[in-house]
Amino acid sequence: MELPRKILIGDGVISSLSDFVQDIGCVGSKIAFVTGRTVKKRAGAECESSFKAFQVENTWHIVEDSSVSSVLKLKRSLSKEIPDFLIAIGGGRAVDIAKMTAFHLNKPFISVPTSASHDGIASPFVSIRGSTKPFSIKAKTPLGVLADTSLLAEAPVRLMASGCGDLVAKITATKDWELARDENNEYFGSYAANLACMSAKIILNESKELRINKRYGIRIVVEALISAGVAACIAGSSRPCSGAEHLFSHAVEYLVGQNYGLHGERVGLGTIMMAKLGAHNGNVGISRRANKSEADKSKRRTGSELLDSCTNLET
Ligand SMILES: [Zn+2]
């Protein structure tokens, strides 16, 4: 079980990035920052000034998308001078690419999310376009997670809503995990499943407050996303966080491209559909066994029936 060594959440904590890095035992003179263009403009100077007092060499790498070719490109540019560790500052793309590259280079990586839009912030899993597997693959657990709530609050509300979509997915994902246990004798970790489900329940319970008070909402959502990521670390698989609703999202990406909605938006829609399709009872706490005949029927549903159901939902 590999868990983040330290998690720091708070207003303005980005200015103490260098202390955070030292606290978790990341030492070295070469740091590779992996980020997006906009985020570099927003937070680049502050990150660099945090390391001013140290004798470190910073290199910045801009990520355009979360594809295999971006991972290879980053690996190529880092191969001239391998960094001692990587710091991902940004949303899903930067975190996924840094995570995967750190895994290939066997170097530690630190996650500094600038949007509360997905649960990859603290988990070892990535979703990389162009890989042979159309689902999440295991890479590297971040050694530390630093979440600056003032920086996160600057991100568009749509990104936080996407994070909520990725969180409600834990309801159907954990039901799928139960199904895998019952039907395929798969390992099921009730602690990890409950932790992931709790992240979803907190968001559902606090949904009104999240809309009214953005600063409060950001803290709740980012804590829940980190918790869900830790649940995946404990489980050693993406089971507590990702089920059929994520497969729906990957299928949409495959068919119409990655830019068709945000990850959490697609997953949130997938969650409603999977709950509605009857493989899961939408009410948490109602035994799947009570719904077994419906689940069996659902498993036999064909692709065209699924498409019909989607069309009906749309109209
Ligand atoms: Zn997700």
Image (cartoon, grey):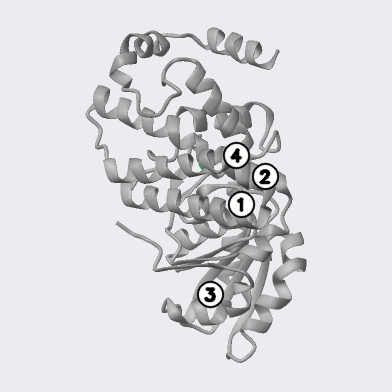
Q: Which mark is residue 311?
A: none
Q: Which mark is residue 217?
A: 1
Q: Nearer the viewer, mark 1 or mark 3?
A: 1
Q: Disc 3 to disc 4, how far (Cα)? A: 32 Å
Question: Quick check: can you spot residue 161?
Answer: yes
Q: Position of residue 226 (x, y in %)?
A: 48, 54
Pointer 4 residue Cβ closer than 8 Å to ligand 1: yes
Using residue 46 as the reference point, say whether residue 217 is left or right of it: left
Above or below, 83 relative to 28? above
Where residue 1 appears, x then y in whole percent? 29, 56
For disc 1, the neighbor class at 10 Å (few under 14, some 14 to 19, many from 20) is: many
Label annotation for residue 211: 2
Q: Which residue is mark 4?
A: 264
Q: Are marks 2 and 1 in contact (CB under 8 Å)?
A: yes
Residue at mark 1 to residue at mark 3: CA–CA distance: 35 Å
Query: Which residue is rendered at x = 51% and y = 67% of the image?
Result: 110
Q: Are marks 2 and 3 in contact (CB under 8 Å)?
A: no
Asked whether 56 or 165 is in front, the reply is 165
Furthest toward the left, the residue is: 185
**Which of pointers 3 and 4 lies earlier in the amino acid sequence?**
3
- Image quarter for residue 264? top right
Q: Amino acid at mark 2?
A: Arg
Q: CA distance from mark 2 to mark 3?
A: 41 Å
Disc on the earlier residue, 1 or 3: 3
The residue wearing badge 3 is 83
Q: Dot 4, how many residues are within 10 Å of its Cα: few (below 14), some (14-19), or many (20+)?
A: many
Instruction: Kindly identify the residue that appears in the image at 67 percent across and 70 percent down.
Output: 60
Q: Amino acid at mark 1?
A: Gly
